[in-house]
Structures are given as structure tokens and as C-alpha cells.
Amino acid sequence: MIDLRLLREDPDRVRASQRARGEDVALVDALLSADELRRSSGVRFDELRSEQKSLGKLIPKATPEERAELLKKADQLKAGVKAADAAQDEADAEAKRLLLQLGNIVHEDVPVGGEEDFVVLETHGTIRDFGAEGFEPKDHLELGEALGAIDMERGAKVSGSRFYYLTGVGALLELALVNAAIAQATEAGFVPMITPALVRPRAMEGTGFLGQAAENVYHLEKDDYYLVGTSEVPLAAYHMDEIIDADKLPLRYAGYSPCFRREAGTYGKDTRGIFRVHQFEKVEMFSYVDPTDAEAEHRRLLDWEKQWLTGLELPFQVIDVATGDLGASASRKFDCEAWIPTQGKYRELTSASNCDGFQARRLSVRMRDGKKVQPLATLNGTLCAVPRTIVAILENHQLPDGSVRVPEALRPYLGGRELLEPVSK
């Protein structure tokens, strides 16, 4: 959540942020009113409670005649205090409800607009000219089926649409990617983590995934658990309700977990193959830092993602995501999009988000610097979303005979294998 002091001192900035996100600006004024009511209710409660305490001191000293009148007034005050307490709780709950609906304040440099209004910051690598090489590229599913690596038909039979099996070299390729990603993250100083896939409501809400993103979250109603869509959720909640000494920052974790997403609102979109699926594995970087270091850490996360994609020898571009596509928690987000030959366009593979103190306030994660205690900043960055990375590798490194060249960086994790070759039928 945002800092309420910012809302009170500069509501126009918050209104501008909401407007840029394409969200309800009226929410700002509703929250201002609720916050004022919450504070005035608190003042009224304190006044009545103080009066009640003062009256309590007078009763033992009063004459019998005075005591009867004071006791009558004490009963009235008791009822007033009880009502004021209830009003304070109600006002506090309403202010918190509205505050949780408000997105993070967008960074001033973020381009304004929707999904297509991003700004390209960099491009890397060379897009292959398959025509000049004399063959038409196959898409990842055709390649994956020929390699004995992907089985969509049985995935649908067992679990439904957007589920799949990785088999043979497909399974080995996933394990190689995960191990290579964890190795890079560990070398960069991240602590590897295998995180829970089920979390309590507070962890999901605190990370910011029960607002506009709620439709894509799987909820187990009987147990009131949520399936995570990213290990960002359990990593953000890892230090929930803790105070971390400033000299221990930054804290960096690399989480490996299954991820589950409903993909609501994507009917008919990316239905072929494994680009957009309901379950997948991912390696996620997560950082807790001093707020003054948040922007620099954001660039560092992006650099680690660029290192990863460069090592996989993939052509990609870096984009500055527009305000309407940030998600509730991020103040700024950089995506790395790899070129997908058969689609003729760049598609998102990694994402790095600066959430400033937004998640930390919701989860009560704070830092202590001397005597000062304040929310710290959290950031997250995808290192390897496995299925999409497999899509990019298969399509960009395919050869005319249907085999796929293994990038050199992955070969040590595939037993030195240089080629993935089609299997005999």
C-alpha cells in the first residue's frame, strides 16, 4: 500500500497515478474522506476515554449525594466510549479496505498508456533470416513433438486445455534451464529457495495479487489457501512482520516453484503449444533493499536478466512497460521480450519490477537504521519462466532437419549435448 502521508500531503500526485493506470480516480477522494473520519473517530474516542478516566478518579472522593450523579454520568460515558470505539474500528476498517484497492504510485518516467504503449529501451542479438538460410522455420510445438519433448494431447486428456507434458529431452531441457538459472543467481549472490506453492490469504493480498489480478488466481476455498502464480508471493511474505537491520540489506533470494494461473481473459489467445499455460515452473529473483537503493537494484535485476538471455543466445528487446500494464504493486517494470520467429514478433520472457515500499507496508516488513524503523523496498525479477524459454530456444536455434542446437551455456547441464535431435516414430 502507499504511504498515507503522501495521500494527505499530495493527493494530486496520487490522483495522477490512478489516472495514468486507467484506474478509478474517485477512489482517492473516498480514501481521503475515510482517513479523515478514521482520525476524527480516534480523537473522539481518546477524548471520551480521557473524560472517563478523570471521572473515575472523582467518584471515590465524592460525597454520597455527588456520587450518585457521577455514577450516572459514568454509565453514560461508558456507553459513549463503547460507541466511539466501535465507530473508530469501523472507520479504520473502511480506510484500510479502500487503501488496499489503491495501486502503487507510478514512477515519473513510466510511459503513459496501455499494453501497446511501451517504450523500447534496448535491442540485443541478431534475428535470423530463415529465408536466406533456405528453409521455413517450424513453430515450437511442431519441433517439440518431433523431438519427443512436448505432449499437448495427453496433457489435455489428463488435465484439460493449456496443460502439457514435457517428455524426454523436453524434461531434461527444463531441468537444465532451472539448474543453469539457479547457478547464475547463486553466483550473483542470491540465496536459492524452494518455496511453498500454497499460501494463506494475507500473503497473497499483501503481495498485491488479490486486486485486479484476482481473476487469475486459483483459490482452494475449503482450506482458504491460494496457489501461487509466482514465487514472488512466498518470497515477499518470507519476512512478513519482521524488522531487518539495515546493515543486513540487501537480502536477495532466488525462488524456484511451480506457478499456477487461470489465464482468465485470454480465451483464444496463444492457445497453441506451451507459451500460455495454467501450470509451469519458474526461477524468480527477489530483493529486499533500502528504499534509497531501489532504483539501482531494479537496474541490477534487469542486467541479470539480460545476462541470462544473452547466455541463451536469444535475440531480445527491453521495454519500459506502460502505466496501464504495470499491475497493482509495481511503480515501474522492465520486460525482456525474446524474438519468436514463427510469430514474427517479440514476446515477454522476463519481467523486473520495482515495488518500492508498497508490498512491505502491506506485509509489515521493515528495516531498522539506528533508531529509525521504516518500510524497506521490495523488487522482483523473472530469471527463467521455463515454458516460454523453451519456446524461444526451440524456435531460434532450430536447424533445417528439425534438430535444435543447444546454446553453449546450457550444454554442461545437458551432459555436453550439442543438439536435440528428432526421435524416430
Image: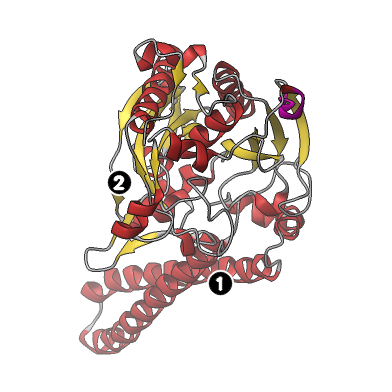
Q: Residue drawn 30% across and 84% down?
A: 70
Is 215 above or below relative to 74?
A: above
Q: Nearer the viewer, residue 66 or 296?
A: 296
Q: Give the residue number, with chain letter if any, for mark 1.
A: 37
Q: Is residue 251 visible?
A: yes
- Crowding near the residue tagged with mark 2, few <14, some 14–19, many ≥20 C-alpha atoms within 10 Å: some
Q: Is residue 297 left or right of residue 117?
A: left
Q: Give the residue number, with chain letter if any, for mark 2.
A: 197
| Quadrant of the rendering where the C terminus is positioned | top left
Residue 246, x across and y down, in percent: 45, 23
Which residues are drawn in magenta? 127-132
Hey, which quadrant is residue 171 in on the image?
top left
- Crowding near the residue tagged with mark 1, few <14, some 14–19, many ≥20 C-alpha atoms within 10 Å: some
Hey, which quadrant is residue 85 in on the image?
bottom left
Is 15 above or below relative to 36?
A: above
Is 5 above or below relative to 24?
A: above
Q: Nearer the viewer, residue 414 or 380?
A: 414
Q: Amino acid at mark 1?
A: Leu
Q: Is residue 202 left or right of residue 135?
A: left
Tell me the tag on residue 51: none
How is the structure coloured here? secondary structure
Residue 154, x across and y down, in percent: 33, 52
Looking at the image, do the residues carrying marks 2 and 1 touch, with CB atoms under 8 Å apart? no
Q: Determine the secondary structure under disc 1.
A: helix
Cα separation, mark 2 vs mark 1, equals: 39 Å
